[in-house]
Amino acid sequence: MNDNIFSLKELVKELQVLYVEDDVKLHNEVKTFLKKIFNHLDCAMDGEEGLCFYKKNSYDIVITDIQMPKLNGIELVKIIKSINKNQVIIITSAHNESYYLLELINLGVSRFLLKPLRFMDIIEMVSIIAKNLNDKKELERLQFKEIREGAMKDILNNIAHHWRQPLNAISLLAQNLELEYLEDEVDKEYVQEVTKKIVSQTQFLSKTINTFSKIFRESKEKKDFNLIEASKEALVILLDILSEQNINLKFTIVEDSKKINLNLNEEYTNEKYNVHSYYNEFIQILINIIDNAKDAILKSKNNKNFGAKIELLIEKIDNKFSIKIRDNGGGIPQDVKDKIFEPYFTTKEVGEGDGLNLYMSKDLIQKNLNGKIEVKNIENGSEFTIFIPSQL
């Protein structure tokens, strides 16, 4: 058995596991065994405590008993599946609990361990699950790499848009300066004026470099940042592309139940919007969802003439933030709305999109930002709402 444990330990070293069992003796025995296998293990004595753990953390595997005080295993499974329908769950069941199994199967549970538990049975089942999870994670890693490479191409395209206007302005200023010099019409004031304008344009370029370098820099570190300033940086990246498509961009925050419209070029400091989270992921999520809104609007504009607009609205509610992205792109059909977060699902023509951006965004929100995302139709469009805690 020790050889099996050693090989399994290597296989499951990155997996997060939650174990829920109310029988003290069995709980302690299985807990001691599971600690030999898993590096990341949380244990709960009843369903209610298990649910508290689940709401605070992300788990690859949940192992739970059925009959428990406060909150039984079936109710626990129902709540977990409502939060994450793809959650892997193992049920530990006694023979006389067989009448519960059909209900659990209907809830999407397909893995059962009969009591009295045999450690070899646990090893065999966990091995199969771990291999499947690791294969899935590797596929997701490749998918995210593919998405990130695509996002980098979009960002480079945005850099080109950002730089075209100031570079053109600098070129014209230099040409005018040369013409004025050749015609002997250059004086000190004119040189100072042109120099000031060129410096202003180069400062804009420098600021743009700083903004984009933050996005390019891969970081898995949590950091303190201001949600408003980070949102501005994401919006600035998209501003030129949206303007070219005649899409109006609006940035709003809610203070004391009042909406305040923010100018992207003006500073607005409010420590209430400080967060400790993943900066890069937050920026990438905003870009993905706003880009999706842009595509929806452009699709609608094929047959309509209307004032296209996208609004980003941020509000702090207790200890979490609500971030809404609204558009007037005509809304999402119900049969599509139920599938938009699935990998490789897209309504775009072949070659125009891979259907991974929204899938990746939801995955990042849930796993990295410990939040959730919802979508609904509003008048003439759709609304994506992201909920994230102020502290991870």
Image (cartoon, grey):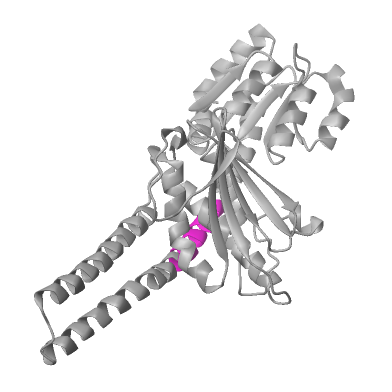
Assess whether residue 256 is covered by the magenta stretch: no
88 vs 299: above or below: above
State the image coordinates of residue 96 (x, y, percent, origin top left): 86, 17
- Residue 155 lies left or right of residue 326; in this view the side is left
Does any portion of residue 356 appear in the rendered image?
no
Q: Residue furthest right?
A: 99
Q: What residue is rendered at 16% in x and 87% in y? A: 180
Closer to us: 149 or 13? 149
In this rendering, position of residue 113 left or right of residue 289 = right
Helix, strand or loop for the magenta stretch, by majority:
helix
Compared to residue 353, the image places residue 15 above or below, namely: above
Q: Front-most of 391 and 355?
A: 391
Q: Is 146 in the magenta? A: yes
Position in image of residue 222 (x %, y %): 40, 38
Give the farthest residue toward the bottom: 183
Q: How many marks?
A: 0
Does residue 74 sit above or below 244 in this rendering? above
Q: Position of residue 373 (x, y in %)?
A: 63, 44
Residue 123, percent across and down? 61, 30
The answer to which image quadrant residue 326 occupies is bottom right
Quarter the N terminus occupies? top right
Q: Which residues are magenta?
A: 139-154
Relative to 208, say whether 350 is above or below: below
Q: Is residue 14 left or right of residue 106?
A: left
Residue at the image position 71 percent from the left and 67 percent from the top: 347
The residue lying at 57 percent from left, 67 percent from top is 247
**Residue 73 shows in the view:** yes
Q: Is residue 44 left or right of residue 92?
A: left
